[in-house]
Amino acid sequence: MTTHDMASLRNRLLDQVATSSMISGEHVSREVFSFSKLLGNFVHLELSEEEAALHWGNILDTWRMMREKMGREVSLHTAIADYFTGSIQLLETPLLVDMPVFKQTIQIAMVDGLTGLFNRRYMDVVLKKEFNRCERYAKPFSVCIIDIDNFKQINDTLGHPFGDRVLRELALLIKDSVREEDVVCRYGGEEFLLVLPETEEAGAFRLANRIRNALKANRFFREQKISFSAGTATYPTAAREIDELVKAADRALYQAKYSGKDRVISAQPERRRFGRFSENWQLTIFAHSNGEPLSGIKTQNVSMGGVQFECAANYTVDTCLDMVFSDADSASAEVRTTGHITWVKKKQRNYIYGVSFSDTPEMLSLRLGELEKTTQEA
């Protein structure tokens, strides 16, 4: 369909349906018009603008034909139902429900009673719809998980009714901070999840910090010394599946919590450029923050890009480390390098760290090259 055809159809459609009380006014103005959003007032089908335009052309033809054959007025809703159930059969068993009853049922099923936000069920629907749209049209989108810091302590010291007020106030603050197209859901407990269409990593990070700054400027939250931590993740750089995207945002939130709370961290793109080898090498580390050596550490895996290890010391993300590998080569010579912590996970009384090398020493490169060759030959 050409641009001229689309424009002609738009004018024809607006002339005939703009007065319908079932159509949202924001989608029928000549300045802001969308074939797909207009059709979304009647059917829940995921359609591109061009597909929706083709359907609208056929619907208008069906509507005219029905009026001519029946010799009386026929509602647009009847024509749409006939078109989608008879002409092309995209809908097989539609249910006739009065719109006020339908909207009330949807609200009960999809809205969280305490905060007025969408609930987990609706979140799953929106995530799937947005993922399919972005996958189809090669668009990015982001999710952001917000978690109130020390919420259990708030409930324990000030009571659950006050905790409920905190949730309601934060829900209002978040809704006032996002765009119209963003979807805000109560994820569970004191967590909120935001679905951010066509938003890249930097945009999601800025939005989360804008909400955090709004919270700091709010008298209620400031007087109660309430803060939150947040993690963001972006499709397709951080993950290419819905579940993995949410997990990536959750891991970023975890990093924010263990880096001191009251901050936002973005999930980093997965970069598995190097093979990982499960080598238990002796490691001594020196954190730039305190300079005290920590020895007796065994590596869990090593690659050209970094190392993973576990220890009892508690470091934050981005902590710089000097590292000494004492048995990484056959001659048992010490191999020194530097790096910084990119992620941390709590494991009972210990912490597991992922460290990115600033520069991979030649001796370590040679040893890992031997391991790579052995793996390929196996």
Image (cartoon, helix red, strand yellow):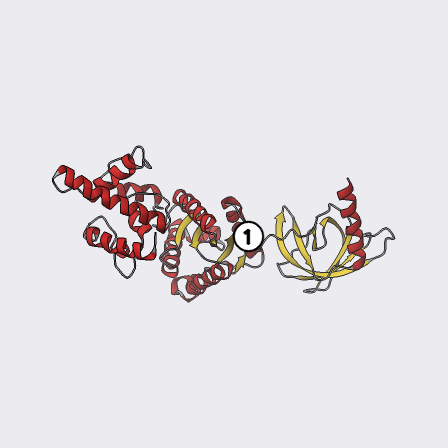
SS label for mark 1: loop
Using the image as rendered, state which of residue 47 and residue 227 is in the foreground: 47
Task: Report which quarter residue 319 is drawn in.
Answer: bottom right
Please state, as top left, top right, bottom left or bottom right, where the C terminus lies in the image.
Answer: top right
Residue 57: image x %, image y %?
27, 47
Q: Where is residue 360 in the image (x, y as percent from the top left)?
A: 74, 59
Q: Mark 1 points at which residue?
A: 238
* Residue type at tag 1: Ala
Q: Is residue 229 left or right of residue 316?
A: left
Residue 114 in view:
no
Outermost residue toward the right in this view:
331
- Farthest residue to the left: give it: 71
Q: Is residue 124 visible?
A: yes
Count all numbered tags in the image, as a single digit: 1
In the displayed structure, would residue 176 be above or below residue 82? below
Circle 1 packing at 10 Å, graded few (<14), some (14-19), many (20+), is many
Q: Which residue is drawn at 49% across and 58% down?
A: 200
- Residue at the spot 65% in from the left edge and 48% down from the top edge: 349
Instruction: Give percent across and percent down for residue 303.
Output: 72, 52
Q: In this view, does 44 lie above or below 316?
A: above
